[in-house]
Image (cartoon, rainbow, N blue to C red):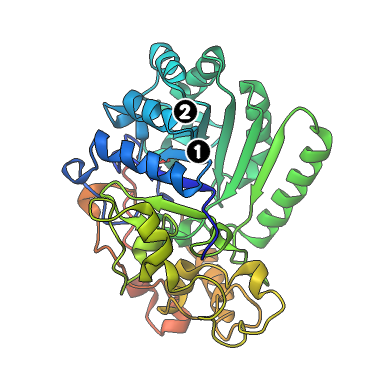
Amino acid sequence: MSDAPLAILAELTHRCPLRCPYCSNPTALAGAAEELDTATWARVFREAAELGCLQVHLSGGEPTARRDILDLVCHASEAGLYTNLITAGVLLDAAKLAALAAAGLDHVQLSVQDSEAGSADRIGGHAGGHARKLAVAPLVLAAGLPLTLNAVVHRQNLDRLPELIALALTLGAGRLEVAHVQYYGWALRNRDALLPTRAQLDAATATVAAARRGLKGRLVIDYVVPDYYAARPKACMGGWGRRFLAVSPAGRILPCHAAESLPGFDFPNVRETSLRDAWERSEAFGRFRGTGWMPAPCRGCDRAEIDWGGCRCQAFALTGDAGATEPTCALSPHHGLLALAVGDAAEAGEAFSYREPRRASTPNPPPQIPRRESGLAAASSRPTFQAHGPRE
């Protein structure tokens, strides 16, 4: 019997006024007509609590695009879950935040694209978005809600990390999450334009270390590093099907938010099964759970029950095989793909392919194998970038 999950990610919708090029949503976005209704989400929250979840992260897309967001927060709170709203903030105002707090919301996680308005609005593709976020942050605090600032960082904003830390302090955030882009979904499509240099990464890591020392007791800083310079994988979501599950807007029950990118899976749906059945008995959750599935050199490795084989979505994105040894491991036969991807990015420009439904591709796009490895010419291996400009 597997351990109980600690948290559930409720992706309430894929609708969003922003079109961030690093969005972790699948490139085939669910439409509003596919979304679960209020009653089904209420049942999902009850089942999550009964299964052992302590927290629910209300996300999207933009969760406040749902007209029933107050009801959803109320249902989650009544189920006994700690409720965290992950939001772009641009649809919020003082009245809505006060109503959310009254409905039982416990915490707000507000994302920013940069410290500079021009760059932030370009990255998010939403004119005036940055100014709106700055106006919303004090309203969160005025509603009596704790605030975390989420800064997604990459090559085009990482040099302003000190300013992002200062912004978190100015806005009164108690926590700052410095999250390097993880290359799934739309971010994988834009990898060449987003992947930082090694020098940028080293400088950012030093900046975070210094800020943690200097701001101890004032600001908690979480730091999520990119995998492309790693020698060992991290335990993605604490291991496949071990401590976390997600539910998509259309009701698919997933071991992680990016798992829809993997072909050959029949993920259960809350419209047809319970969370407990999916967690404890579905083939999809069991396939990469534990260590029995691991190939060499993972099998028998002294880190097998530390990193749990790393990220299956990243293994597929880089190799085309979800069961392959994670390329971020130095012992993987595919480890060299990371250096090739870094080399590709060093030669790329800064134009984005923005997140938008009309440009959605198939649910399982082909892996992004670096062009030197694939043998393809540069013109055929890179996405077609169009700089029109916004998701958090």
Give the spatial CA distance, label 1 vs label 2. Answer: 8 Å
> Mark 1 falls on what kind of element?
loop
123 lies left or right of 3: left
The residue singled out by tag 2 in the image is 130
Q: Earlier in the sequence, mark 1 or mark 2?
A: 1
Residue 335 image position (x, y, % from top left) = 59, 79
276 lies left or right of 220: left
Q: Are marks 1 and 2 in contact (CB under 8 Å)?
A: yes
The residue singled out by tag 1 in the image is 113
Please state which of residues 340 and 263 is positioned toward the viewer in this rendering. 263
Q: Which mark is residue 233?
A: none
Residue at screen point 42% across, 66% down: 285
Residue at screen point 40% across, 78% down: 320
Residue at screen point 57% across, 33% down: 149
Residue 305 occupies which quadrant of the picture? Answer: bottom right
Vertical placement of residue 173 versus 275, above or below: above
Query: Dot 2 surroundings within 10 Å: few (below 14), some, or many (20 or more)?
Result: many
Residue 210 image position (x, y, % from top left) = 81, 42
Q: Which residue in the rendered view is the most extreme toward the right?
A: 213
User: In the image, what residue type sits under mark 2?
Assistant: His
Q: Which quadrant does the C terminus fall into? A: top left
251 lies left or right of 6: left
Residue at screen point 41% across, 71% down: 368
